[in-house]
Image: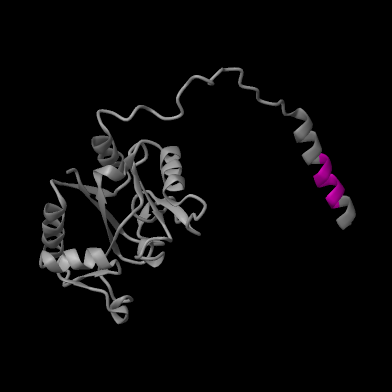
Amino acid sequence: MLSSSREEILKRIAAVSKGRSAFVDNHLVDNEPIYKSVLPDAVTCFKKELEAINGQCILCENDQDAYQKIKSLLQEKSISSVFCRNTIINEQLAQFDVPSTSDKDQFIGMAAGISECEFLIARTGSVLVSSASESGRQMNVFPPIHLVLAHVSQLVETPEDALNAIQLKYGDFLPSTITTITGPSRTADIEKTLVLGAHGPKEFIVFLSVL
């Protein structure tokens, strides 16, 4: 009985496969770009693309302006301190009187975390990060609100540009993990309803210094 049922199923699959015709696209695309142009400039394009996927990009005049805006954001959201593992960023947070902590005992209960990044990808609004970061892998997925400090010099146009740049940066000693973050965590698995923060940060905010 099982054998005959199996044979019947295989016959049906074979019949459907035989009836299908291969799809051949004869349209030549060799000289056509994969991505749309980055317009009107990389900063504007990155901001637009990130915000289109529920992320935020806060433009800052310089590093000082960035830390002041981080401080204001924490106050607006009634967050007592931001968790940070990066030594240099922690020093800057202290310099500009931004409440922060690196106490590992407060990691689980953090309301927001801040980290650095490798590169920003203008065309997709993505942030390239790696395990070489002092912040570590956890900071990219654990904080309910993930803040990223970046500079205009880290902007590239496409994912390929970002990969080329990180290869140039690390040479034969590439980090064990290289990945992109494209907006806050999301899923639509349940009844096709978009839910933010299902598997990671609910809010993803990039503070981009343009000078």
Residue 121, x across and y down, in percent: 35, 42
Please provide the residue range marked out in magenta. 5-11
Please, is residue 54 above or below residue 143 in the view? above
Task: Name the outermost residue toward the bottom.
Answer: 105
Q: Quadrant of residue 87?
A: bottom left
Question: Which residue is at 25% across, 28% downward?
Answer: 40
Residue 30: horizontal and vertical position, in percent? 54, 21
| Residue at 76% from the left image edge and 28% from the top image edge | 19
**Left or right of 15 in this view: 184:** left
Do we see residue 57 in this rendering? yes
Q: Please state if 133 lies on the left or on the right of 47 as rendered.
A: right
Up-down: is 209 above or below 139?
above
**In the rendered view of the protein, which quadrant contains the N terminus?**
bottom right
To which quarter of the image does residue 124 belong?
top left
Q: Residue at x 15, y 69 (%)?
A: 94
Q: Residue placed at 83% from the left, 41% from the top?
A: 11
| Residue 88 % position (x, y) | 24, 64
Residue nearest the observer in this picture, 65 or 204: 65
* 160, 76: nearer the viewer: 160
Question: Please, which residue is most extreme toward the front here?
Answer: 172
Task: Name the quarter where the C terminus is drawn.
Answer: top left
Q: Is residue 200 above or below residue 31?
A: below
Which color scheme is applied? one colour
Question: Magenta span has 160?
Answer: no
Q: Is residue 157 left or right of residue 208?
A: right
Nearer the observer, 34 or 77: 34
Give the prevailing secondary structure in the magenta stretch: helix
Q: Is residue 98 visible?
A: no
Q: Residue 85's spot in the image, x, y percent?
A: 30, 69
